[in-house]
Image (spheres, grey):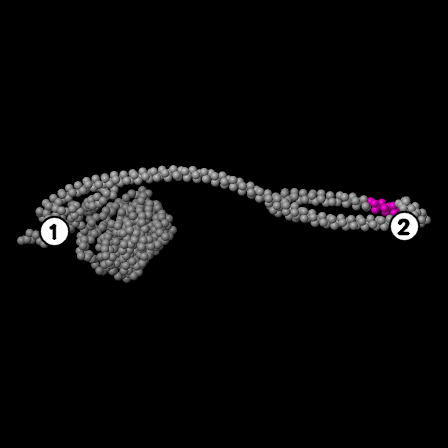
Amino acid sequence: MEGPGVLGAPAARWKRHIVRQLRQRDRTQKALFLELVPAYNRLLEKAELLARFSEELQPEPDDVTLSVHQGPWEKESHQGLSPAALRVKWQEEVEGLRLVCGEMAYQVVEKSATLGTLESQLEERQSRLAALKARVEQLEEVRAKKAGQVHARRALNEEQRAAYEALRARVGHQEAALRRLEEEARDLLERLVQHKARAAAERNLRNERRERAKQARVSQELKKAAKRTVSISESPDTLGDGIREEAETLVVAAKPGSLESEAGEKWKRPFRSASATSLTMSRCVDVVKGLLDFKKRRGHSIGGAPEQRYQSIPVYVTTRLPTQAHDVLDAHLSEVSAVRFGPNSSLLATGGADRLILLWNVVGGHLKANQTLEGAGGSITSVDFDPSGSQLLAATYNKAAQLWKVGEAQSKETLSGHTDKVTAAKFKLTRHQAVTGSRDRTVKEWDLCRAYCSRTINVLSYCNDVVCGDHIIISGHNDQKIRFWDSRGPRCTQVIPVQGRVTSLSLSHDQLHLLSCSRDDTLKVIDLRVSNIRQVFRADGFKCGSDWTKAVFSPDRSYALAGSWDGALYIWNVDTGKLESSLRGPHSAAVNAVAWCYSGNHVHLGNGEASGWRHMETQAWFQSLPYRAGAERSDQETAGRKAQRQQRAVVLEPWTFLLCSKIVLVLGPSLQVPRVD
C-alpha cells in the first residue's frame, strides 16, 4: 500500500494515516460481524441445548413405547409418537439447523472475502486521495506564491509606468529647453562668427597696412641697394657656415679693364630691373630666403636644382629613464611590427601585420587615435616620417614601399621595383629622397618627386634595416655584416663584421655613433669616427625575438633601448656600458618594435598591442629645431660655433611665422603670432 510518504510527505504524516486506516477497518469489520456472531452463538447454544435434551430423552428399553407416546416436546401433535420417532425427527431438525449454520458460515466467508477486496480497494483509493490531497496542497502553495509574484509584478509595473510617464513629461520639457538652447546657441554662434569676421577683417586691414608700409620700406631699400654693387663677405660672428658659402657665391670678381663680368650681370640684373619697385612682400621674402637657402645639389641631383635638407640641432639635456607603463592599447588586430614618432613628438605611427598604419596623438602621456592609413598591399615592416613630419613612408611585404601624406587615408605613391619583401624604408635628410632595403639582396635609393629609383645597390646578403646620414647609407645584413655606402659614389666604402645576423640599426642625432642589434643577443655601439665597435651590451634574460627586433638610442645618446623575447624592456647606459634597468610591462610575447620620442618624454613599444612608458616626473628632455644646412658639420665644433648655429636656427623661425600670419588671423584671432618688425 502506497502511503503519502512516497510523495514526499513527512514520516509522521503517513504513520498517522496508517493508524487511521487500521482503526477505520476495525470499525467497518466490527459493524459487519456484530449481528452475525451473536446469531451464530445463539445457534450454538440452541444446538447444545438440543443435544442435551436429546440425551435426556433417550428412553429406557422398557419405557420406549411410553416415552414415545408421552414426549415432552409435542404434547399435542406428537403425543402418539414413539421416542424413537421423536429422536429421528429431532435429529432431522438438528441436521437442518446444521445445514443452515454451514450455509450461513459459507456466506460469512464469502462476505469476508468480498469485504477484504473492498477494503483493499478502499485503502488504495484512500492512499490515492491522500496523495492527491498532498499534491493539491503543494499546488495551492505554488498558486499562492505565483499569485503573490503576480501582485508584486503588477505593483512594479504600475510604479514603472508612473515613472515612465514622469520621465516622458520630463523629456518633453528638456527637449523643449534643448530646442530653445539650440536656437540661442545658433544665434550666439552667428553673432560670434560675425564678430570674429569683423575682428579678422580689421586685423587683416591693419596687417595689410603694415605690410604695405614694410613693402614700401623694402622697395626703397632695394632701390638704394640697386644703385651700388653688393659685396657679401664672410662673417662668422653672425652667420653660419651654410650662409657663408652662399655669400661667397654672390661675390663678383672684378677684372682689369672690365667693370662687371657676366656672372655679376646675372646677379645684378634682378636688382637693376624696373620691376624692383613692384615687388610684393612674398617676393621680398623669397629674395631674402634665397640668400639663406641650401647649397645646390651635388652627386645625383638632377639639373642642379636646390635640395632642401633638414637637420636636427640637439639640446643636450639628461634623459630620464622610464619606470612604468603609462598607457596600454590594443592597437592592431595582429602583431605590431613598427612604431615611429613624428619630428614634433606629438604624433606616433604604428604598423602591423593587419596591413594598417595607425596614427596616434600623444596627449598628456596617453595615445588618442588620430587617423588610419589604408591601402597597404601587405604586412607593415617599417615606418618613417620625413623630416617635416608631413609624409610617412612604410615598407611592406608586397615587394614595395608606399608613401602617405599625413592627413590623407589613401596611399600617395607606391615605390615598386623590389622582387622580394621590403624590410626597411627610411627618408634621407631631404623629404624628396628615400632608401629601401629588401630580402632580394638590394638597397635602392628613390627620387620621391618622380617615384623613380635613382640607384640600385646589389649586395651578397639580404638587408634587414637601413639608416641614412648626410652623405652615407648604412645597411645591416643577414650575413652578420654592416655595410657603409657613399650616396655620391658607386661602391661600398666600409664593412664592419658583427657576430650574429643584424636585426636593426639606429643612428645617433650627432651621426657619430651607430647602434646595432643582432641575433647573438647583443647590442653594439659603433664609433663612426674610427669605424670600430666601442661597446657591446649584454644582459641575463635578454634575447632577440625575431630577425626584425629593433633597438634605438635615447635622444641624447645616453641610453640604448631594446625589447626582449619575453616582453621585457632593457635599457643600457652608453657611457658606463652597464644595464640601467629591466622593465617588465604588460607584454607577454616578444617586443619587436620600440621608439623613443625626440622630446625624451615617452618610450613606445609593441608586439600585439601598443604600450607607452613614461617617467612620472619627466618634462621636455630633448628639443629639436629645424634649420637649413649649408655645409657639413665638423666633429671638432666649438661651443661658440654650436651657439651660432642654434641662433641661426632661431632667426629663421620668424620668417615662417610671417608667411602664415595672415592665415592664422583669419582662421583664429585668438592665436598669438610673434610680431615681426
Q: Position of residue 59 (x, y in %)?
A: 92, 48
Query: If you read the primary sequence from the N terminus, does the residue marked by circle 1 or circle 2 appear first?
Result: 2
Q: Classify residue 173 as left or right of residue 193.
A: right
Q: Position of residue 110 (x, y in %)?
A: 74, 50
Residue at horizontal 79 percent and vertical 44 percent from the top: 39
Q: Is residue 50 magenta?
A: yes
Kindly report the secondary structure that dominates the magenta region of the rendered protein: helix
Tag 1: residue type?
A: Trp
Q: Secondary structure at mark 2?
A: helix
Give the labeled residue for mark 1.
267
Tag 2: residue type?
A: Ala
Q: Does residue 266 appear anywhere in the picture?
A: yes
Stretch of the chain drawn in magenta:
45-60
Q: Residues within 10 Å of mark 1 (few under 14, many from 20)?
A: some
Residue at horizontal 22 percent and vertical 60 percent from the top: 490
Which label was assigned to residue 651? none
- Residue 4 found in image quarter: top right
Residue at horizontal 23 percent and vertical 41 percent from the top: 200
In the picture, which quadrant includes the C terminus?
A: top left
Q: Classify residue 23 as left or right of residue 659.
A: right
Q: Is residue 479 above or below residue 365?
A: below
Q: Nearer the viewer, mark 1 or mark 2?
A: 2
